[in-house]
Image: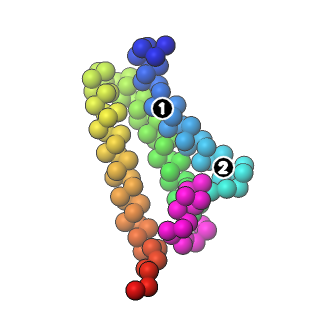
Amino acid sequence: LFHNPTFIKWKPTVLYWFFAGTLLFSALVLKKNLIRSLMEAQLKLPEPLWHRLNLAWVGFFAGMGVLNLFVAYNYSEDTWVNFKLFGGMGLMLVFVLAQGMLLSRYLEEEPE
């Protein structure tokens, strides 16, 4: 099973969708924003912004899962491996940097 190319190509998608589902389930059913739990010590954000930030991560992970399958089934295995290694990491970096730029105005400055 672990050497099956189909299983290997689906594994990142399942993981991405698991992350998206966990964030969404936690927010909608458990009424707990996991992104807020991780970041509220560093950021003080209005409640609607915490909700949008959580949804942004849900969307990112869901989209990465779809994109992984698209590349896996429309391009060669070598292309998929390169996308998985470099493309996924690059997209995550761009996503995190974009969020950092948008959220930087909410960072609290420490008194000197």
Where does the C terminus fall, quadrant-wise? bottom left
The local crowd at label 2, few if under 14, some if 14 to 19, many if 20 or more residues have their Cα within 10 Å, is some
Report the magenta residues as a range. 34-49
- Look at the image and tell me whether residue 75 can be seen: yes
The local crowd at label 1, few if under 14, some if 14 to 19, many if 20 or more residues have their Cα within 10 Å, is many
User: Can you tell which mark lies on residue 13?
Assistant: 1
> Compared to 3, does 86 lie above or below?
below
User: Could you say which is closer to the camera, residue 14 or residue 107?
Assistant: 107
Residue 19: which quarter of the image? top right
Indicate the position of residue 21 as horizontal and vertical percent values. Answer: 60, 41
Indicate the position of residue 90 as horizontal and vertical percent values. Answer: 31, 45
Q: Is residue 36 part of the magenta span, yes or no?
A: yes
Among numbered discs 1 and 2, the one appearing first in the sequence: 1
> Compared to 53, does 84 lie above or below?
above
User: Can you tell which mark lies on residue 26?
Assistant: 2
Residue type at the position of mark 1: Thr
Decide: marks 1, 2 in contact (CB < 8 A)? no
Residue furthest to the bottom:
112
Residue type at the position of mark 2: Ser
User: Can you tell which mark lies on residue 50?
Assistant: none
Indicate the position of residue 29 as horizontal and vertical percent values. Answer: 72, 49
Query: Which residue is rendered at x = 49% and y = 68% of the image?
Result: 42
Indicate the position of residue 41 as horizontal and vertical percent values. Answer: 54, 68
Element assignment for label 2: helix
Query: Which residue is rendered at x = 42% and y = 24% of the image?
Result: 9
Q: Is residue 20 part of the magenta span, yes or no?
A: no
Query: Which residue is rendered at x = 59% and y = 48% of the image?
Result: 23
